[in-house]
Image (tube, rainbow, N blue to C red):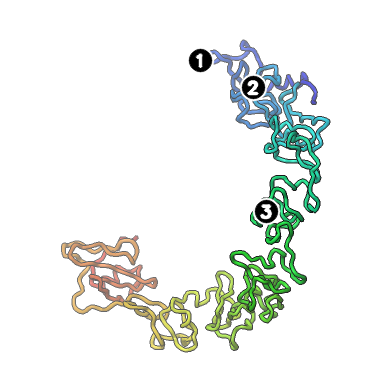
């Protein structure tokens, strides 16, 4: 209990809210109400600040908002009727089990627990119904049912009294119950407790278990006898729940010291589940005995699971024992390089950025096969000689209607057949002119003379004139000078509207 209001507090309150007489305060000419000085407004017969003082602990929107008297906010709400009293409070903003003080409703005081209260004092009136505390919690409805209890505080050998939930009763459990006494018959089927819980049906299975405290988790309950926990044979070093787990899709656990029955009778490293291994990151499964682990080779930078998996893995720092010797790029079956990198085709144990095969557009079996120089595949085939020309290509893979771009053996462009005779003119027959809109690769405007005119330009500026779906290669010029180039090559009168 805090002390009563003092004259110092009263004087502070009235000075902040602007107490004064109407005669001494100028009047508004419109409605004859007093005019408040400074950042204040007239309310309930007095001037009050527009914003709450620093001692106000509630939301600013609750201060003087004509929504009722807010108490427990550290300072008097102008909405409250003077003198302040608990009866005048519309809302109390105290937290936990605290309530506004009787002598000063702007302040809060905590409830004093009754002498019978056995729980922590802070639990009383904290917004949660606490049961088993020796006395009723003010948060609990009256009468209180077991279903109302948010928390229970009975000792392990006791349970909540269903008649008076504020009290605890000794819990009589049958002989052989190994779990906490208050878990027997508490409404949840407990498994692995030595004997069957009265909450478990006579036909209960592993899927009916709601809790398995002694076993660690429900997966460690013996599915054949839910009153017991699983055990694993001596030598098993993985989680007990992983041994012979069975289920719809059993996982073969490898590197666990002894064979897992889920692996079958003739397991191989490929039988092992990638997510269920007892080997550490620096180890891999022994192909001769998948229940054992071997240390990774010196210099191996990838996960151990890539070793003895039946595949030649590249990009791991050293040669995978399952790869042929000498190691070539085409022998690699698994690329273990990190995101954004690829196997170096010239040194398959290392990874590089912008690996040529990453932009390879042909069948990967053709890349660096040691036999043919394959062209038109997006990147240079290492089988091609340095500075190779189109004449040295063993195969060109540009597809129908395309050809190698001039001066390149990696890039394909549309094949353009030079036309003979008159190919048309850029000057329309109706007197208009063909115009370029947008970028080089955009079509030209229609002339209305019965012909279709288009222009396409490669990134290096080589331009193509297309008339009625046929094209003529412009051997010189660039996109920036497309007007003069096409004038001389195509014989068109063009106007460039791109700039």
Residue receiving disc 1 = 30
Q: Of tags 2 and 1, which is closer to the observer? A: 2
| Residue drawn where x is 64% and y is 12% of the image | 21
Number of other residues with Cα within 10 Å of mark 3, as a class: few under 14, some 14 to 19, many 20 or more: many
For the point 67% across and 53% down, the residue is 209
Q: Which comes before the other along the chain, label 2 or label 1?
A: 1
Q: Nearer the viewer, residue 471 or 118?
A: 118
Asked if the residue at tag 3 contacts the one at tag 1, i.e. Cβ–Cβ closer than 8 Å, the answer is no
Can you tell which quarter of the image residue 261 is in?
bottom right
Q: Which residue is mark 3?
A: 209
Q: Position of residue 267 (x, y in %)?
A: 64, 77
In screen coordinates, is 340 left or right of 300? left
How far is mark 2 from mark 3, CA to CA?
59 Å
In-front residue for pair 169/131: 169
Labels 1 and 3: the sequence-earlier one:
1
What residue is drawn where x is 77% and y is 18%? 7
Seen in the picture, residue 28 relative to 101 is either above or below; the reply is above
Residue at (73%, 33%) from the top-left corner?
125
Q: Secondary structure at mark 2?
A: loop
Between marks 2 and 3 in the image, the one whose residue lies nearer the viewer: 3
Discs 2, 1 touching: Cβ within 8 Å: no
The crowd level at tag 1 (other Cα within 10 Å; few <14, some 14-19, many 20+) is: few
Indicate the position of residue 58 as horizontal and vertical percent values.
66, 31
Residue furthest right in the image: 115
**SS assignment at label 1:** loop
For this orientation, the residue located farthest to the top is: 23
Instruction: Residue lying at the far front in this picture: please name it.
Output: 202
Q: In the rendered image, which residue does mark 2 sit on?
A: 78
User: Would you call the spot at circle 2 few (<14 residues within 10 Å), some (14-19), or many (20 or more)?
Assistant: many
Q: Is residue 215 left or right of residue 453?
A: right
Q: Earlier in the sequence, mark 2 or mark 3?
A: 2
On residue 281, the disc is none
């Amino acid at each position: 209990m805090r002390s009563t209001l003092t004259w110092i507090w009263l004087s502070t309150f009235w000075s902040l809210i602007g107490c004064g007489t109407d005669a001494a305060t100028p009047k508004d000419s419109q409605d004859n109400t007093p005019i408040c000085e400074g950042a204040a407004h007239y309310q309930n017969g007095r001037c009050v600040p527009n914003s709450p003082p620093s001692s106000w602990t509630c939301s600013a929107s609750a201060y003087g908002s004509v929504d009722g008297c807010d108490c427990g906010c550290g300072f008097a709400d102008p909405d409250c009727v003077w003198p302040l009293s608990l009866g005048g409070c519309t809302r109390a903003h105290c937290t936990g089990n605290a309530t506004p003080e009787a002598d000063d409703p702007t302040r809060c005081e905590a409830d004093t627990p009754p002498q019978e209260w056995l729980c922590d004092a802070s639990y009383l009136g904290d917004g949660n119904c606490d049961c088993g505390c020796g006395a009723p919690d003010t948060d609990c409805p009256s009468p209180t049912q077991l279903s109302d209890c948010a928390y229970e505080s009975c000792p392990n050998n006791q349970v909540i009294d269903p008649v008076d939930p504020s009290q605890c009763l000794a819990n009589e459990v049958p002989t052989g119950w190994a779990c906490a006494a208050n878990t027997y018959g508490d409404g949840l089927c407990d498994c692995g407790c030595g004997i069957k819980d009265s909450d478990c049906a006579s036909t209960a299975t592993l899927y009916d278990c709601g809790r398995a405290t002694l076993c660690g988790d429900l997966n460690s309950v013996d599915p054949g006898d839910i009153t017991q926990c699983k055990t694993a044979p001596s030598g098993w070093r993985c989680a007990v729940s992983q041994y012979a787990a069975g289920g719809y899709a059993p996982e073969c656990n490898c590197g666990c010291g002894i064979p897992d029955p889920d692996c079958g009778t003739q397991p191989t490293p490929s039988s092992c589940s990638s997510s269920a291994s007892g080997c550490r990151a620096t180890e891999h499964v022994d192909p001769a005995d998948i229940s054992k682990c071997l240390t990774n080779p010196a210099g191996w930078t990838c996960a151990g699971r890539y070793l003895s998996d039946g595949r030649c893995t590249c990009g791991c720092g050293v040669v995978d024992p399952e790869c042929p010797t000498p190691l070539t790029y085409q022998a690699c079956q698994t690329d273990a390089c990190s995101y954004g990198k690829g196997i170096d085709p010239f040194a398959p144990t290392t990874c590089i950025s912008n690996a040529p095969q990453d932009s390879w557009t042909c069948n990967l079996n053709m890349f660096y096969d040691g036999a043919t120089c394959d062209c038109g595949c997006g990147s240079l085939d290492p089988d091609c000689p340095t500075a190779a020309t189109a004449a040295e290509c063993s195969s060109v893979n540009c597809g129908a209607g395309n050809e190698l771009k001039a001066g390149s053996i990696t890039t394909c462009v549309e094949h353009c057949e030079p036309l003979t005779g008159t190919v048309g003119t850029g000057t329309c027959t109706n007197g208009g002119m063909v115009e370029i809109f947008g970028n080089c690769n955009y079509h030209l405007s229609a002339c209305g003379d019965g012909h279709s005119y288009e222009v396409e330009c490669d990134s290096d500026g080589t331009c193509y004139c297309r008339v009625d779906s046929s094209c003529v290669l412009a051997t010189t010029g660039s996109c920036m000078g497309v007007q003069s180039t096409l004038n001389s090559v195509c014989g068109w009168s063009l106007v460039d509207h791109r700039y």
